[in-house]
Amino acid sequence: MRIIWIIAAAWSLAFGPPAFAQSPPVPVQAPPPTQDGSDDDQLVVDVTGGRRAALPIAIPFMPSPQAADTPAGNTQALGRQVAEIVSSDLRDSGLFTPIGPSGLQAVSFPQVTAPDFPYFSTTGAQNLVQGFVQANANGSLTVGCYLYDVAAQTELTRQGYVVQPRDWRRAAHRCADTIFSRLTGEGAYFDTRIVYVSETGPARRRIKRLAIMDYDGANHRFLTNGQWTVLTPRFAPNQQTITFMTYQDERPRVMLYEIDSGQTRPLVAGAHMTFAPRYSPDSRSIIFSMAVNGNTDIYRIPVGGGTPQRLTSAPGIETGGSYSPDGSKIVFESDRGGSQQLYVMNADGSDQRRISFGGGGYATPVWSPRGDLIAFTRTGSFRIGVMAPNGSGERILTSGVYAEGPSWAPNGRAIMFTRGASAGQLWYVDVASGATRQVRTPLGGSDPAWSPLRD
Amino acid sequence: MKSATSLVAIAVALSLTAGCARRNRELPPEPVSSDQPDGSETGVDDGGIAGAAVPGSRADFIQSVPSDRILFELDSYSIDDEDRRTLDAQAAWLARNANVRVTIEGHADERGTREYNLALGDRRANAARDYLQSRGVAPMRMQVISWGKERPQVPESNESAWAQNRRAVTVVPE
């Protein structure tokens, strides 16, 4: 499961495919591109302010130096699928309007590094993604990924990914990540996974199974069989474990699931209900809530187990703790003031300060991976919103149907959440624009948790 | 006397075996999850014929008390006079059936977030347990479990449904 990044200099040494024997394209002679509906000020994607029109980007099918069958399929078929995934990822971001792959002129293997710029300028594309899929003698695949500026007729970046055939989709997501980051200046997020609770059956006897899938819904699999209700899974930042709550043996408590081995074990000893777990940024400890005789407080425990350290002690419900990305602070919810509101404290529990003051209430705070925002559920109306860590600049992102439980994309520009109270679906919202879309799952879904960018 | 003891032992062994089989994690997934809150599903009518219930059974309990559950106001876990009458009757039945252990389930309606509702359900179950304890029921006979909003009694989104879902249910084993 390794992806090897290859910079341009090392590329030809390591692999030397014919594409790199080509001279770079001569960046003159071609007439100035004639763009359809040219919009000259749209050279940089604006991801923070008001949304301008999405950036048109051409993504033709990716050729192979030589068609070859692999366990993942023929390289020519893979070249079409990789281009489709790159196109789909960029479209889903809301910041791009992909052109192709269908309907575009075919690209030959030598053309991968020598694009037909005059042709692509007629498509209205400002940028162009080309690439190839090659089967290597040792059974691995090499996926090349090139980004061009059509008008300037220049190469902006290139990356190569060597993957095992079963990981071919990851190479496509990594290509899309490279393009997204290069053109927006934002962090990548397509090569990620989602762990969530798959739901089916009537509300009174809802069957809830832990499930994991790629960010785009591919490679879906169940991690538990539905015998016991499971809730609120979360990825360890190091992606070695998932913590979640289960009713296994009718003892509601936090468990730890080892992703590689599939083993599970309880996090905390004792008979009290434990829930609402979240990892520290260094993956070494977990904060969770424990209900003792009707009083719920937040505790911290090493991932390997041990004695929980109590962080809150107010006579109320303290839950939903989430670390700041530097690990120095924890945001949590408490009803100590009468309604559910958000508070920030130091990681050792000291200096607890209320940061939200709106009516109705606030719950499920989650600190952004960038540290700049805290996402929350506004109770009462059940909408997803964000605010600065000092409580200023509150902004509601969703409207209408019941929404709950935000989880940040690793680049901090999108949020996944649950829509629906007793029968949920997964939804996605772009933080800058507020654009939402449903995330498709085989059954119902709730409690999504976004993984960090994969290694 | 000896034979009665061994009969009880056999019955206990059988029920333990049945419990083990039902919870065997080697089995394929069952069509419904096996962690059903028993009380919520069987509700008030357990099919027992009036007067015929086995003393100490769930059916006997249901027949003998005004209700197996108390209901709460929105976001509240306080117990009112009607709840006290219900719990007094439950405590009296438990005094008559001193070997019965119960589970008290706390539930919330859907108008709270998932984790908060787990804590709220725990508060409600503990409120019922604390009152029963004050009426003489030994704490070791009572186990509490919170289901939050995961097991609504009435899976609808209206005031009447929410009122029935905000509950603490005293569950006697079948």
Image (cartoon, coloured by chain):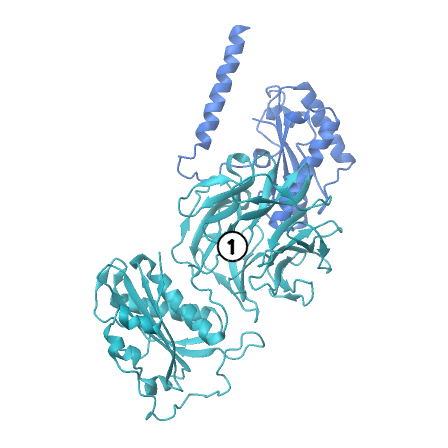
Image spot of residue A345 (x, y percent): 68, 54
Image vertical order of residue A110 relative to residue A256, above or below: below
Which residue extends farthest top? Answer: B1
Tag 1 subunit: A
Image vertical order of residue A56 relative to residue B8, above or below: below
Residue visible at 41% across and 88% down? A35
Image spot of residue A100 (x, y percent): 36, 75
Task: Name the one closer to the observer, B72 or A230.
Answer: A230
Image spot of residue B34 (x, y percent): 49, 36
On the image, numbered disc 1 is attached to which residue?
A: A448
In the picture, the quarter occupied by the N terminus of chain A is bottom left
Task: Name the one closer to the observer, B55 or B47.
Answer: B55
Drawing shade for chain A: cyan
The answer to whether residue A164 shows anywhere in this view is yes
Residue visible at 49% across and 72% down? A94
Q: Amino acid at mark 1?
A: Pro
Image vertical order of residue A62 relative to residue B75, above or below: below
